[in-house]
Image (spheres, rainbow, N blue to C red):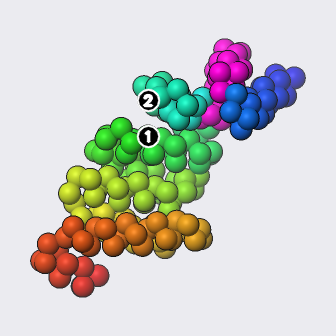
């Protein structure tokens, strides 16, 4: 009976979030998590709400970490956590997280490689950024992601020195 209640509350909160009723969605998720603290997908949605609707990245980070802990087979938590790390300028943490989880079958490799590329790029490691963008291209079926990655590659190449560009010719 408990699992059904948790699922019902989660679906209700998800619909409220879709309807932009974010306070109500948050309250239902908090209620759900008080009864079912290990409901990973609820942590993920609550993290997303805190990040994108309430501008509270500290709480978002905590809930994404709980989502990954309790729903390690759900890719959304990994993706959202990666977005948060780059958005909050935690590039070294993103590199560690991404490299540690890239071979996890639950992650969207295209997303993780993209975020790794962004972290490398923003740290000034343009060769590794370019490599990650290429890997993201290889691992996506999304036309939108492809266009975004080709744009990122173009941007990185414009930032490269002459000698860095020569190094890319051998790859």
Q: 26 or 78: which is nearer to us?
A: 26
Give the image location of residue 39, x and y in percent: 67, 28
Crowdedness near tag 1: few (<14), some (14–19) or many (≥20) residues, C-alpha within 10 Å:
many
Q: Which residue is drawn at the image coordinates 50% and 33% (left, top)? A: 51
Main secondary-structure element of the magenta-colored stretch:
helix
Q: Which residue is mark 1?
A: 84
Q: Relative to 13, does residue 146 appear above or below in the rendering?
A: below
Give the image location of residue 129, x and y in percent: 30, 63
Q: 170 or 30: which is nearer to us?
A: 30
The answer to whether any part of residue 96 appears in the image is no
Q: Are marks 2 and 1 in contact (CB under 8 Å)?
A: yes
- Residue 13 picture quarter: top right
Sequence-earlier tag: 2 or 1: 2
Badge count: 2
Residue 167 is one of the magenta-drawn residues: no
Q: Residue furthest bottom?
A: 169
Q: Which residue is drawn at the image coordinates 20% and 57% (left, top)? A: 124
Secondary structure of residue under mark 2: helix
| Image-based side of 79 in relation to 160, left or right | right
Q: 144 or 20: which is nearer to us?
A: 20
The N terminus lies in which quarter of the figure?
A: top right
| Image-based side of 159 in relation to 76, left or right | left
What's the magenta region? 22-45
Q: Which residue is mark 2?
A: 57
């Amino acid at each position: 009976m408990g699992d059904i209640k948790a699922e019902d509350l989660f679906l209700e909160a998800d619909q409220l979030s879709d309807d932009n009723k974010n306070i109500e969605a948050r309250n239902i998720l908090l209620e759900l998590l008080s009864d079912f603290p290990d409901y990973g997908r609820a942590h993920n949605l609550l993290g997303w709400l805190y990040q994108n609707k309430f501008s509270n990245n500290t709480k978002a980070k905590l809930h994404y970490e709980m989502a990954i802990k309790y729903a390690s087979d759900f890719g959304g938590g990994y993706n959202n956590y990666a977005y948060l790390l780059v958005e909050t300028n935690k590039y070294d943490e993103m590199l560690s997280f991404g490299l540690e989880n890239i071979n996890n079958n639950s992650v969207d490799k295209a997303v993780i490689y993209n975020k790794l590329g962004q972290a490398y790029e923003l740290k000034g490691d343009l060769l590794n950024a370019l490599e990650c963008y290429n890997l993201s291209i290889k691992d996506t079926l999304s036309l939108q992601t492809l266009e975004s990655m080709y744009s990122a590659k173009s941007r990185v190449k414009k930032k490269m020195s002459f000698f860095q560009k020569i190094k890319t010719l051998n790859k």
